[in-house]
Amino acid sequence: MEKDKNSKTSKAIDLENSNLLLTPKDIADYNPKWLINGFAESNKLISLYAMPGSGKSLTALYLAVYMLENKVIKKVIYVDMDNGLGTLKNRGLEQILNKYEGQLKYISSAKKAKKDIDPKTLIFSLSETANESHKDTLIIFDSIRNFISGSMSYDDVVTPTLDQLQKMRDYYAGVWFLNHQSKQDFTGENNKAYKGATAFFDSCDEAYFVKKRERKENMLIVTLEPMKQRDDTQPQAVIINTANLSLEFDDYAFYSMNEKQSVALEYAKKIIKENPNGTNLTNLTTEIKRMAKFDEVEICGIHAIKNLLKQFDGKFYKIISNDTKNFLTFYPL
C-alpha cells in the first residue's frame, strides 16, 4: 500500500517534560525592574510611533541618555538608518557622544564609509548572538521600515523580523523600535494609528503614540500616550533641552490639553485668583462661559470643563468639597 504523500513521521512531543516548562523558581529568579518608572520596564519590546517630524527619534535618544545618566542601564546601541548628519548635529548628538563615550554607540547610515551592515538582515543576525552579556544594554532601531525586506503592510512579511525582536527582548535591557504613521485626513484630528501590518502592534509589549506639543529653539515638549499596555505604564510628558542635553518629566494632563481646554483652564485660573474667599463650581463655570463669549473664543463643553478642573486640584488652585451638599469650592493656592 502506497504511503500517503502528505503524512509525516514525527517524534512524539512530551509537553509535560518540555525544556520550556516553567517552574516556580523560574518566576522567582526573574526580577524585572523599571528603567523609567511608569514608562519602560526591563526586557520589553517597545514601539514609539508618530507622524514624521513629531520628535520621536529625538525623544527616544534623550530617553536613552536619561537612563544612562540615572545608571539604570550601562550601554545604549542606537541603530539609525533614517536621519542625516545635519539632523543629528541639530539634536546635540556630538555633545552627547562626547559625554557618554563608550556608553552610547550610535550606528548611522549617514556616515560616509563602506557599508558593512545590511539593515534587512541585521536584526536576524543580532538575534542569533543575543546572550546574557546584553542584559544592561538598550538597543533602538530607527525606524523599523529600514530593517524589513518587503511591504510593511503584510503580517507574513513583518512577523519574522518582529519574532527576532521578541527573542532579543529576553536578553537585552530593552528593545525599542520607531515607526511612522500613515497620512492623516484633513479633519485635523490624529487617529493615532500606526503604519503597517497589525503585527507591529500585536508583537510589542508597549506602544506609545508620540505627539509634539511645543517646539522652539532648543526645547521640545512631547507627550507619550500608551496605546497598548501590558504593564502599569502611564502617559508621560517630557521636556527636552538640546542646549544642556537634558530631559525632564512633567505634567501629562497639562500638556495633553487641546486648545479649547487650555483656554478654559486659563479663564478658570484667572477667576479663582480674583476670588480669594472662594468661588463655587456653578459660578466658576458660568463665568468661564461668559468670558469666552465676550472674547469670542471656543472652549470645551461644561462636562469637559468640570473634569478638567478636577485634574488640576493642588496644582493651580485648591478644591474643598462640602460632602453634605456635594458642593465644590475653588480657592487660590
Image (cartoon, rainbow, N blue to C red):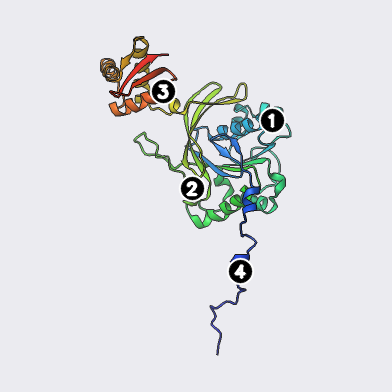
Residue tagged by mark 3?
312
Question: Real-space Cα distance between discs 3 and 1?
Answer: 39 Å
Q: Which residue is mark 2?
A: 201
Instruction: Give x and y (percent) for residue 307.
Output: 35, 28
Q: Are marks 3 and 4 in contact (CB under 8 Å)?
A: no
The answer to whether any part of residue 231 appears in the image is yes
Q: Earlier in the sequence, mark 3 or mark 1?
A: 1
- N-terminal of the pair, mark 3 or mark 2, is 2
Residue denoted by label 4: 14
Number of other residues with Cα within 10 Å of mark 3, as a class: few under 14, some 14 to 19, many 20 or more: some
How far is the residue under mark 3 from the one under mark 2?
33 Å
Disc 4 and disc 1: Cα gap in Å? 51 Å
- Of badges 4 and 1, nearer the viewer stands 4
For disc 1, the marked residue is 97
Q: Tag 4, which secondary structure?
A: loop
What's the distance in space between the residues labelled 2 and 1, CA to CA? 32 Å
At 62% across and 30% down in the image, what residue appears? 66
Give the percent coordinates (x, y) of residue 233.
51, 38
Residue 257 higher or lower than 174, as above or below: above
Mark 2, secondary structure of its residue: helix
> Helix, strand, or loop for circle 1?
helix
Disc 4 crowd rating (10 Å Cα; few below 14, some 14-19, many 20+) is few
> Which quadrant is home to the C terminus?
top left
In screen coordinates, is 18 left or right of 251? right
Label 3 secondary element: loop
From the viewer's perspective, is 153 left or right of 105?
left
